[in-house]
Image (cartoon, grey):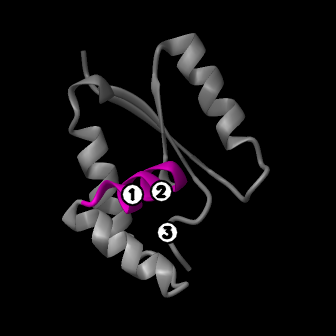
Amino acid sequence: MAAKHIILLGPPGAGKGTQAKRLEDARGMVQLSTGDMLREAKSSGTEMGKRVAAVMERGELVTDEIVIGLIDEKLAQPDRAMAALSSTDFPAR
């Protein structure tokens, strides 16, 4: 089966999380939230997590390069053949 990815974009409160949950329930997809991924990376202690933590502690926006790296890592996991990605602040502008 070919990988299927759906990307949900919109401002805070637009319903991305709600729609992603519906996709999880209806299609057995996995929700990937960039906000959740950043918080997870920050607390992970990995090299990527240290980069995320440093940027966040300075109060800056995390670069697109870092977010793309986190997304790539998640999509490479075996249970991520079907994923719904929700993001509020990506790409960072």
Q: Residues within 10 Å of mark 1 (few under 14, many from 20)?
A: few
Q: Which mark is residue 10?
A: none
Q: Main secondary structure of the magenta part?
A: helix
Q: Position of residue 13 (x, y in %)?
A: 79, 50
Q: In this figure, which residue is indicated by the disc labeled 3?
A: 91
Q: Is residue 88 visible?
A: yes
Provide the secondary structure element on which disc 1 rests. helix
Rendered view: 82 above or below 88: above
The reply to whether residue 65 is visible in this rendering is: no
Dividing the image into 4 quarters, which one contains the N terminus? top left
Sequence order check, earlier mark of 3 and 2:
2
Marks 2/1 in contact by CB < 8 Å: the verdict is yes
Report the residue at 40% width, 34% height from top.
Answer: 5
The type of residue carrying mark 2 is Arg
- Give the residue number, with chain letter if any, for mark 2: 39
Q: State yes or no: residue 7 in magenta.
A: no
Callout 3 secondary element: loop
Magenta residue span: 35-45
Q: Tell me the residue at 39%/62% (across/down).
A: 42
Residue on which disc 1 sits: 43
Q: Neighbour class for label 2 at 10 Å: few (<14), some, many (≥20)?
A: some
Please provide percent x and percent y for residue 10.
68, 55
The three-letter code of the residue at mark 3 reads Pro
| Residue occupying the point 54% across, 20% down | 24
Sooner in the amino-acid sequence: mark 1 or mark 3: 1
Q: Could you tell me how far apart the alpha carbons at marks 1 and 3 are, in whole angstroms?
A: 22 Å
Which amino acid type is shown beneath numbered disc 1?
Ser
